[in-house]
Image (cartoon, rainbow, N blue to C red):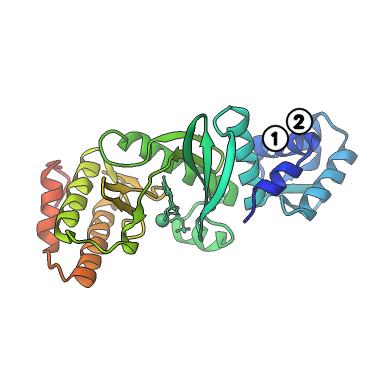
Amino acid sequence: MDLVEPYLRMSKTGWMVLKAIFRNMWDYEYVPAYIISRDAKMSQEKVETLLRKLADEGIVTNKYTEYLGSSFTFMGLSIYSLHLQVKKGRVSMIGKLMGEGKESVVYNCMSRDEEAVIKFHRVGYPSFKKVKKKRDYGTLHFTVLTIRSARNEYQALKKLYGKVPVPRPISWEGNSVLMELIDAKELYRVKLENAEEVLNMILDEVASMYKAGIVHGDLSQYNILVSEEGIWFIDFPQSIEVREEGFQDILKRDVENILTYFRRSYGIEKDMNEALERIVEECRSSEWT
Ligand SMILES: Nc1ncnc2c1ncn2[C@@H]1O[C@H](COP(=O)(O)OP(=O)(O)OP(=O)(O)O)[C@@H](O)[C@H]1O
Ligand SMILES: [Mg+2]
């Protein structure tokens, strides 16, 4: 997905309309045109013309009921979030697309003088119904869920940075998280010579994470980066706090994923319960059974 071209094509009035949608989307799945008109101080006619144009460009989706209402698409929410990062002086240049998956689009960028990464979340979109059913999010729609997911990732990174090797979080705006660029490759793309040592390093860091109060929740060979310099953990939107409901099962699944990967790829056998006990020992949680 190209964000730069639609970003550059936006007009000043277009940004004003997006700002009004952003401000009101907490209250309305489709923000009524009259609310946008009031917020952006623009005639309703002008707002409706702009909304139709933005819909043609894939930035919003409009719904016609008793009134015309408008909602962000993933692209629209992403360019508005990028706009906020740029306005706050945190992003000065967008570089190449680094990854595009089901749940995110990741770009290389410049933040002040530093090379960084900006990740645009899209949890729940377009498969929003599935997510809603699975976790009972009530009436929350994809924009709100996506922003929550970005916030959760940013907060986990903030909590862990300095304690566990994770990218340094720089900022969070809308569905975007800006963070340090790690110069390393995903574990699954690397042939390790010291696999056992790396596995132990990973388990030690999972213990440090646990001690810091976080369970990753999607730990796998895809979300661990490795280089000569060390290992890093990425991808935290689904992380949960230790003591949140069900955290034990999630920790167990995380550890299981890693042990399975090392068993299949390197023939290393490690006992699941021993590995878990070692992690939990670090914290001596009384709630652990
Ligand atoms: N801080 C970073 N430094 C370097 N590369 C990164 C960084 N963050 C993400 N990446 C790259 O972008 C990819 C996707 O990021 P991440 O794992 O956070 O998102 P994701 O939700 O897994 O996306 P997907 O929808 O593809 O599953 C990573 O596999 C990695 O290659
Ligand atoms: Mg990932």
Against 239, residue 19 (above or below) is above
Which residue is pictured at 69% across the width and 43% down the height?
Answer: 7
Front residue (pair 74, 99): 99
Front residue (pair 178, 135): 178
The local secondary structure at tag 1 comes to helix
- Residue 47: horizontal and vertical position, in percent? 84, 40
Which residue is pictured at 34% across the width and 46% down the height?
Answer: 240
Q: Tag 2: residue type?
A: Asp
- Residue 25: horizontal and vertical position, in percent? 65, 41
Against 249, residue 37 (above or below) is above
The local secondary structure at tag 2 comes to helix
Q: Tag 1: residue type?
A: Lys
Mark 1 lies on residue: 19
Front residue (pair 239, 95): 95
Tell me: 246 left or right of 100: left
| Disc number for residue 39 | 2
Does the rendering let one see residue 141?
Answer: no
